[in-house]
Image (spheres, rainbow, N blue to C red):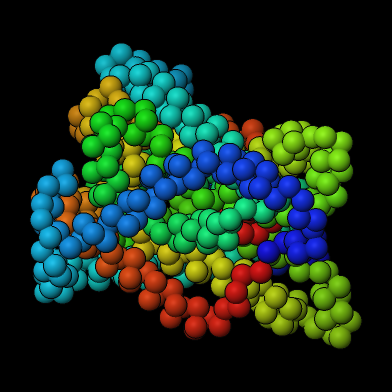
């Protein structure tokens, strides 16, 4: 749409946009600002908008008095494993669905689409029972396995592979390449962009997952950050600086991933919604 | 199926399918064990009186009978519908509005876009702890600004709207992105042609933008509807269903039946009921929106 740079309406719109953007960021700013206050400064009236100099007592307290570091390691390991396994398995499966003829291909694709429609939460109860039987409760296997089994990446990759000209595979076959080589040295490099985008989106989703870790873990050393932080928060009671410090620590990886790879996240989110 | 499939040479068919099986095996193993199997199991479970360890026996449709006369379940359905009403259309509308504002900008567009999208990448527990701090009854900055003393999450009138507000703040960036993509796909020639015909800015918006953005709007509404019916995390973290069960939603009810009341079979029944409700409402919705199949 064309913009009239000098119209009054245009100026008003721009002002509204800026005010809304600041309002939208304010809660995040307020969390960060509160985390560097002393506990007494958090509840004074009028509120201190710009805490200076920053006071890091809350962070030190949280790190020293809770297994936050352990939870961080748990969450990093879980989300990196989920991302790696989900992306590599999905690439292989999508390539087979897109390029190879095999009995059950249509059935598999239909099963993926149906699975895509079933809300994960509705399977939580039988899945938890299954995890109990496998002895996966409070284990990384329990945290990781169900998050790998999501059909989203397969569906997205298949759409992208479908658009690669078939001649590429036929030519490579004549040159003596097998399908593994064709996938990893032709199809994957041609689709680096979407692979990378989906990886970041799946990483953020796995890091932020709350529902499944809540169900499959209950021993303190096996919690992930999003679940663990709520446990320490309820122990703190009215201690807003500490509560906000846990929030800041928990947000760093995903916020950083977004701010560093903004375009990739956008691309991945669009592809996940079925828009390219 | 992809074009050109049928006239492909059918050579080495058995070798090709052996390769295919190897390629799909890792994913399919996980998919069958951790998605298909539990999805089938939930149906069997709903016909039993199992506890959460899976011990129990078949009791036929007794769980379903109980469900139909379970006041607490129907109250939870109503609370979920209330939440859906509070979020689906407002979240789409705010997303559309923000997309229009962001797309007007020449400079700073990416920066402003990321301001609206950033909350979406935060873990839900960060979102809710930030919200409970800002909306705290005694020390929250919102009550400070308004000069009030409202316990936003502790008051049965305000609790659900507050959870809805937090949800919109958290997730509207996603809808905004979809609308931005949709708006950018509208060819500029349409606007130019309309302008040549003498359409003013408002008319161009009404007769070019609105009809051409409709497919994206419909997509956003469908995605939102399914998503918001599955409300659990925010309510679990902010209100735990309270005060006096005013925010007890279906999935929280399922969670409570399963993990606190130790009734795995009945919880499975609640889960199935939720799927049925989502399917019915989605079908009605796509009729109403007169959706064409997506691409």
Tell me the quarter of the picture where residue A27 sits: top left
Instruction: Looking at the picture, tell me which residue is in the foreground, B197 or A43.
Output: B197
Q: Position of residue A13 (x, y in %)?
A: 66, 62
Instruction: Left or right? Give the position of B124 relative to B79.
Output: right
Q: Residue at x 83, y 81 (%)?
A: B194
Is residue A184 visible in the rendered image? The answer is yes
**In the image, is A241 to the left or to the right of A168?**
left
Q: Residue A243 is drawn in which quadrant?
A: top left
Q: Residue at x 66, y 69 (%)?
A: B295
Residue B41 rendering spot, x and y as whole percentages: 28, 54
Looking at the picture, tell me which residue is in the foreground, A48 or B29: B29
Residue drawn at 79 percent across, 58 percent down:
B8
Q: Position of residue B239 (x, y in %)?
A: 23, 51
Question: Which one is in front, A2 or B12?
Answer: B12
Work out whether B250 lies above or below A126. Answer: below
The furthest residue to the bottom: B197
Q: Residue placed at 38% from the left, 45% from the top?
A: B34
Vertical relation: B180 (above or below) B26 = below
Does residue A249 show up? Answer: no
The N terminus of chain B lies in which quarter of the figure? bottom right
Q: Position of residue A125 (x, y in %)?
A: 25, 49
Q: Is residue B69 left or right of residue A44?
A: left
């Amino acid at each position: 749409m064309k913009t009239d740079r000098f119209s009054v309406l245009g100026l008003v719109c721009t002002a509204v946009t800026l005010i809304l953007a600041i309002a939208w960021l304010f809660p995040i700013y307020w969390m960060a600002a509160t985390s560097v206050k002393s506990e007494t400064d958090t509840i004074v009236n009028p509120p201190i908008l710009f805490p200076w100099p920053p006071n890091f007592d809350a962070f030190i307290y949280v790190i020293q008095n809770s297994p936050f570091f352990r939870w961080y390691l748990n969450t990093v390991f879980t989300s990196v494993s989920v991302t790696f396994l989900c992306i590599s398995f999905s690439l292989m499966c999508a390539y087979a669905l897109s390029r190879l003829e095999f009995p059950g291909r249509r059935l598999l694709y239909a099963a993926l689409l149906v699975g895509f429609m079933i809300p994960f939460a509705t399977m939580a109860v039988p899945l938890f029972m299954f995890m109990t039987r496998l002895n996966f409760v409070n284990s990384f296997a329990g945290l990781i396995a169900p998050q790998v089994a999501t059909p989203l990446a397969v569906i997205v990759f298949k759409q992208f592979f479908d658009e690669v000209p078939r001649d590429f595979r036929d030519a490579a076959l004549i040159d003596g390449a097998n399908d593994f080589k064709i996938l990893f040295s032709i199809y994957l490099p041609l689709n680096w962009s979407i692979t990378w985008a989906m990886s970041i989106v799946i990483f953020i989703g796995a890091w932020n997952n709350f529902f499944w870790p809540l169900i499959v873990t209950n021993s303190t050393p096996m919690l992930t950050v999003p679940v663990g932080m709520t446990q320490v928060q309820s122990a703190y009671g009215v201690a807003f600086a500490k509560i906000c410090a846990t929030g800041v620590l928990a947000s760093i990886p995903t916020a950083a991933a977004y701010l560093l790879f903004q375009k990739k996240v956008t691309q991945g989110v669009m592809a996940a919604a079925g828009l390219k | 199926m992809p074009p050109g499939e049928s006239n492909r040479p059918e050579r080495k068919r058995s070798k090709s399918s052996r390769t295919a099986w190897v390629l799909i095996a890792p994913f399919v193993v996980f998919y069958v064990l951790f998605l298909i199997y539990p999805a089938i199991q939930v149906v069997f479970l709903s016909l039993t009186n199992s506890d959460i360890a899976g011990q129990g026996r078949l009791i036929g449709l007794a769980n379903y009978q109980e469900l139909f006369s379970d006041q607490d379940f129907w109250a939870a359905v109503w609370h979920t519908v209330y939440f859906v009403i509070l979020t689906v259309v407002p979240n789409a509308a705010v997303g559309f509005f923000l997309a229009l504002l962001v797309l007007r900008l020449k400079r700073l567009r990416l920066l402003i876009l990321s301001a609206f999208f950033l909350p979406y990448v935060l873990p839900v527990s960060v979102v809710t702890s930030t919200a409970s701090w800002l909306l705290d009854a005694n020390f929250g900055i919102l009550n400070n600004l308004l000069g009030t003393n409202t316990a936003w999450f502790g008051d049965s009138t305000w609790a659900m709207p507050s959870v809805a507000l937090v949800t919109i703040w958290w997730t509207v960036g996603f809808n905004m992105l979809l609308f931005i993509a949709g708006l950018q796909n509208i060819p500029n020639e349409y606007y130019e042609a309309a302008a040549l015909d003498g359409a003013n800015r408002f008319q161009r918006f009404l007769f070019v933008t609105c009809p051409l953005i409709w497919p994206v709007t419909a997509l956003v509404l469908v995605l939102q509807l399914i998503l918001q019916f599955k409300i659990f995390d925010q309510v679990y973290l902010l209100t735990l269903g309270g005060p006096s069960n005013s925010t007890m939603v279906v999935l929280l009810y399922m969670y409570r039946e399963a993990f606190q009341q130790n009734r795995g079979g009945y919880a499975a029944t609640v889960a199935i009921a939720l799927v049925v409700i989502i399917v019915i409402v989605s079908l009605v919705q796509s009729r109403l929106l007169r959706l064409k199949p997506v691409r």
